[in-house]
Image: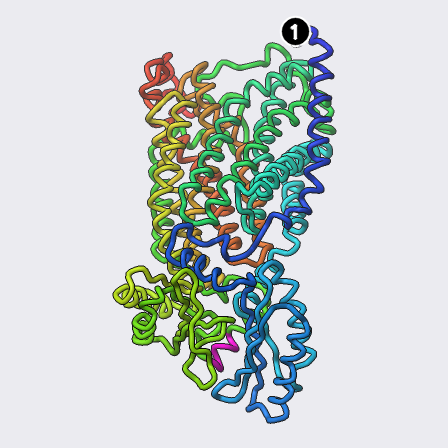
Amino acid sequence: MKQAARTPRIPFWLRWLIPVVLVVGWVAIAGVGGPTFGRLDEVSSNDHATFLPAGAEATEAREWQQKFQDSGEVPAVVVIESSSTLTPSQLGTAADLKASIEDLRVGSTVVGPVPSQDGKAVQFIVSVAAAEPADAVEELRREVRAGAPDGTQTFVTGPAGLAADLTGAFAGIDGILLLVALAAVFIILLVVYRSLLLPFIVLLTSVFALCAAILLVFGMAKAGWIQLNGQSQGILSILVIGAATDYALLYVARFREALEHTANRTAAAITAWRASFEPILASGATVAIALLCLLFSDLNSNKALGPVAAAGIVCSLFAALTLLPAFAALLGRAAFWPFRPKLQPEDAREPELVTGLEGQRGLWRAAGTLVSRRPRSVWVASVLLLVVASAGVMQLKANGVPQTAVILSASNAVDGQDALARHFDAGSGSPVVIVSSQAAAGEVLEAVKAVDGVGAAYLLAEGSVPITGAPGSPASPAVRDGRVLINATLDFAADSDAAEQAVSAMRNSVTQADPGALVGGVTATALDTNTTAHRDLATIIPVVLAVILVILMLLLRSVLAPVLLVASVVLSYAAAMGVSALVFNHVFGFPGADATVPLFGFVFLVALGVDYNIFLMSRVREESLKHGTRPGTLRGLGVTGGVITSAGVVLAATFAALGVIPIMFLVQLAFIVAFGVLLDTVLVRSLLVPALAYDLGPCIWWPGKLARREPQETTKAAEVAEAGVR
């Protein structure tokens, strides 16, 4: 057989110099970015303030509250609990513990011990330095355990305790999460490529992209442009590894094709780059811009994640389009060892397509045959299946979860909150904070006390001592810029629905006494977060859809195809949320979901789901220009089937790795995205979209020129496919 013609000689600078420079440049970036990974704690904070609604009443109240706390401290609640009534000896030991706590110098004040009414517990209020609450809380726990009366249990809870345990839940995120994700990706790549070298090359590309992203994010956080927290840090690692690997899979597939047509590795690398540049760029731009739409959110946590994740996608994009082609140009066929692609004879290239199934085998030929024979039945059945799955979304309880349910691992602070509720006023650990004008303080205080569910309310005095009216208490309140602070203890747990209803009633009541009064605290923050999250859904979703539509229209030179693709991905998202709701409620037994879960799930699933449709439809359009829409659809499905399915499995596996972090939000997001990506890969991209495109034929490209270009493929291909050509 006649072999392929020789490729013209490629100059030295293109064969060796540029690839080597690119590899060395990325190695230098990794050399700096790798160590920076361990320094993210310097610019990262898990303080709940980083999650607050930016313009909410609770946030404004917190800013005023900080003016009354000159030391910048947060309260920790020490609880000592016994199964029976504490004896005088045990109470004496507990009283002696106050001096030991004060000697620790973890904060400026220690109040207590305060015994419970049932006599089975005492509590201390200890102010802890806000800068390093985790270290201070751990030291406090050791001291309390050592000095507590015999036969008692000890807990350190309250805002400082919960913050410390939240930080602990994120501990090891840099190592464990990355290790799990990389191990999962490596195993999948070994199965996909059956090569020993190529998985390492792809993983190096992903890791180097992550190092670049770390450098970029660290610089932005250091400059104060973004707020970095453990949540966004974990998502960044997963997103970069998954996205960079997906882009690499697409490039490697085109590189393998090119190696079958040329003996020159540099020419093959350049050919693959040209073929994959547009879909990779469109995919990366779609995801990055969709993530940046989170800047329209009024939640600080969303605002922080947008630019952080977008930076990761941009770095993944550049690594896939620069470092990976450089590796390919240097290694050529050796990258695929021991199953190197063979150079095909010239007469074996580009067979004339009639049905689009020519040259295909196995699963994707079977899928193409099904799509070509019964396209309408396939896409209608797929839509009905997704609609049925979407019905479960009615059971999604995304109105926030109790603070004690956020951490899924063992937590001393969570157990302490339960102990507080057993022996003290349910809301004593997290009082409602009311900021009032000094002139109206008396009226506001009475209005607060009149609200159902308020157990106690008092003005705050200088030195943070409550004015209770008891003998010896200070006579004048603390005043800052004409404002005073009122604390109110609720009869309900701070993270309960009843507490939120009480806060809503309190806001209505106090504003009648003082229109400028503000109600904040833990419960108010949760209430405002839920309200803001639901508002964000209505604001951000249309923006994301509009952005994706514009990018798809530019890429596919069509209006109808992008509209149908976006509709399919939205339906897939609804189905994923419906199934997730059922799993959360009936399998995992979660009490609910964070209010931001639907928004995060939407942004990731829609943006990433469109990714695979971009990979598919860009190839379908390429093939349609040469062979016609219907053969081009089947050809595009066949040649992209393996790579897109592999990409979907990789992305699902990397997001599933988020489940190793014992935070409910991340576990839920991990399941939603992993399941949603697999659903989109297996059903939407493999059956629904190809069947819809085949059924509509050339008009799917309306109003582009391709819709009017119908090179006799409509009737001929349909007739041959209907006849069952093998």
Q: Can residue 726 be seen in this view?
A: no
- Element type where label 1 sits in the image: loop
At 55% from the left and 43% from the top, the residue drawn is 224
Residue 19 image position (x, y, % from top left): 70, 20
The kind of residue tagged 1 is Ala
Residue 570 image position (x, y, % from top left): 38, 40
Dot 1, crowdedness within 10 Å: few (<14), some or many (≥20)? few
Residue 385 lies in quadrant:
top left
Q: How many labels does the image show?
A: 1
At 60% from the left and 42% from the top, the residue drawn is 222
Magenta residue check for 709? no
- Residue 477 sits above or below residue 339 on the image: below
Residue 597 image position (x, y, % from top left): 44, 51
Residue 639 image position (x, y, % from top left): 53, 26
Quick one: quadrant of the N terminus? top right
At 39% from the left and 75% from the top, the residue drawn is 457
Magenta residue check for 420? yes
Q: Is residue 667 visible?
A: yes
Q: Nearer the viewer, residue 243 or 677?
A: 243
Q: Nearer the viewer, residue 632 or 81?
A: 81
Residue labelled with disc 1? 5
Q: Nearer the viewer, residue 714 or 688?
A: 688
Residue 407 lies in quadrant:
bottom right
- Residue 201 sits above or below residue 331 on the image: below
Q: Nearer the viewer, residue 642 or 223?
A: 223
Write the start and end of the magenta stretch as one range.
418-424
